[in-house]
Amino acid sequence: MAGRVPPPAQPPPEDLPRVTLWRLRGNPLRRRSDLLLGWFGLGLLAAVLAAAPVVALLAGDAARRHYARTAQHQAETRRPTTAVLLRDVPRHPEPGSAEAALTRYPARVLVDGPDGRTRTVRTEVEPGLRAGSTVHVWADRDGRITGAPMTAEEIRSRCMGWAICAALATAGAGAAAYGTAARAVRRHNLAAWEAAWTRTAPRWTLSS
């Protein structure tokens, strides 16, 4: 009777290669350039983490002052007025819905200019309005239809957007700097390997 076949022996567990901060750990394959690049990366990361909040704060503050001046200028040069709708506006496919409340249709209206003359202009109005309806619009000093002055909420939203963009740009600049350094180190290593192989190759060549 055939004997029982023993189960195959399990191979000894192998240590998984650790790649975290491998440039900073001592190992036979680590080059001086790897060590320098590792420390450069850590220093660059610390610099980006420290600079990003400062850059975001400065960008947000600059944007706040810019948009505050813009909003003040808009408030001084724009005025609310009324206009008369010339034609019926189409109804929204879903009247009463949240989408209908946000939808605006282009339409022609009559509005009084700063000189007292009535002119026909185009603006965007709510759906479903009938011809002859009165709509509220904003006009500039020349009588052109424009938007309302920026609100405090709009200013905060734009400032936050600029602050986020500035922080991302700082991180992108850091990543670009590290990528440039890594490419330079790679070219240096390839040149060093080629020079070493040039010196070593003759020893591997068999004499005829």
Image: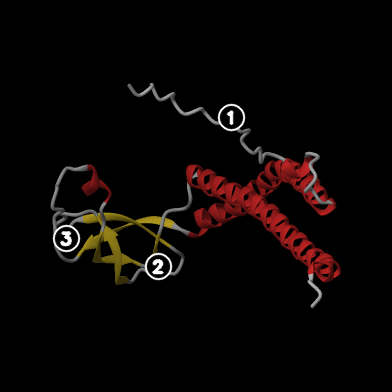
Q: Nearer the viewer, mark 3 or mark 2?
A: 3
Q: Which mark is residue 169?
A: none
Q: For the residue carrying disc 1, how many other residues have a C-alpha within 10 Å: few (<14), some (14-19), or many (20+)?
A: few
Disc 3 residue type (three-letter):
Val
Q: Secondary structure at mark 3?
A: loop
> Where is residue 70 drawn, in percent x and y?
56, 56
Q: Quadrant of the C terminus?
A: bottom right
Q: For the residue carrying disc 3, how many other residues have a C-alpha within 10 Å: few (<14), some (14-19), or many (20+)?
A: many
Report the Cα–Cα distance between label 1 and label 2. Answer: 81 Å
Q: Which mark is residue 89?
A: 3
Residue placed at 72% from the left, 40% from the top? 21
Q: Nearer the viewer, mark 1 or mark 2?
A: 1
Residue placed at 44% from the left, 69% from the top? 142
Q: Which mark is residue 13?
A: 1
Q: Secondary structure at mark 2?
A: loop
> Where is residue 28 drawn, in percent x and y?
80, 45
- In the rendered view, tell whether residue 21 sits above or below residue 29: above
> Where is residue 37 drawn, in percent x and y?
78, 51
Work out whether mark 1 precedes mark 3 in sequence or the reverse, and give the earlier one: 1
Q: Nearer the viewer, mark 1 or mark 3?
A: 1
Instruction: Identify residue for label 2.
Output: 143
